[in-house]
């Protein structure tokens, strides 16, 4: 067991590679699942993550850099995409491809609505058209508190 894994579940996040970037993804692999929410507040996120991480680890498909995206497509739920290195048995395996503009934000989760509006402006300023918006929660709330920073990345598929 590494020293890191004894002290927290999420590695420290480095914003620079994600902030103000244009990312090109070609068939990037993810496991997709659904989280139940009430007014965008997740109710079973931990259970969904636990179930999927067990499958991912059993398949030896855990990525070195854990990217977990949320598509907040309903007040009552969100699609969650967990980055993997290969297909995972008994899971919904999907890929994402395209161009993504990324921007890093820092602060409490309650600011997401403001960040979404700022991201939409960023996309327009880059003379692009927003197709879909994903939220990359870089650490769990416990680790964000430990690190003293709560970084959230918005990824705009353009």
Image (spheres, rainbow, N blue to C red):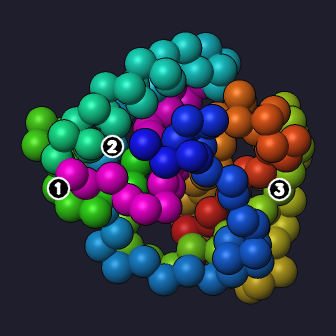
Visible residue check, residue 27:
yes
Indicate the secondary structure of the residue bearing disc 3: strand
Pinpoint residue 19: horizontal percent, then vertical percent: 75, 72
Q: Which residue is mark 1?
A: 87
Q: Residue at x 40, y 48 (%)?
A: 82
Q: Residue at x 63, y 35 (%)?
A: 7
Q: Is residue 124 left or right of residue 42?
A: right
Visible residue check, residue 71:
no
- Quadrant of the rendering where the N terminus is positioned: top left
Q: Is residue 92 left or right of residue 107?
A: left
Q: Which label belongs to residue 32?
A: 2
- Viewer-nearest residue: 49 or 122: 49
Look at discs 2 and 1 and give the one toward the viewer.
1
Q: Are marks 3 and 2 in contact (CB under 8 Å)?
A: no
In this picture, which residue range is highlighted in magenta?
A: 60-80
Q: Residue at x 38, y 59 (%)?
A: 63
Q: Which residue is mark 3?
A: 105
């Amino acid at each position: 067991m590494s020293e890191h894994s004894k002290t927290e579940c999420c590695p420290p996040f480095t914003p620079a590679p994600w902030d103000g970037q244009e990312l090109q993804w070609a068939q990037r692999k993810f496991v997709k699942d659904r989280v139940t929410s009430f007014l965008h507040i997740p109710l079973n996120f931990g259970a969904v993550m636990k179930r999927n991480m067990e499958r991912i680890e059993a398949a030896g498909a855990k990525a070195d850099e854990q990217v977990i995206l949320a598509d907040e497509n309903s007040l009552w739920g969100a699609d969650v995409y967990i980055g993997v290195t290969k297909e995972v048995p008994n899971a919904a395996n999907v890929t994402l491809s395209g161009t993504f503009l990324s921007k890093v934000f820092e602060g409490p989760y309650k600011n997401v609505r403001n960040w979404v509006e700022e991201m939409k402006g960023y996309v327009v300023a880059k003379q692009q058209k927003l197709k879909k918006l994903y939220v990359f929660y870089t650490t769990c709330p416990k680790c964000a508190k430990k690190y003293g920073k709560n970084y959230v990345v918005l990824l705009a598929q353009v």
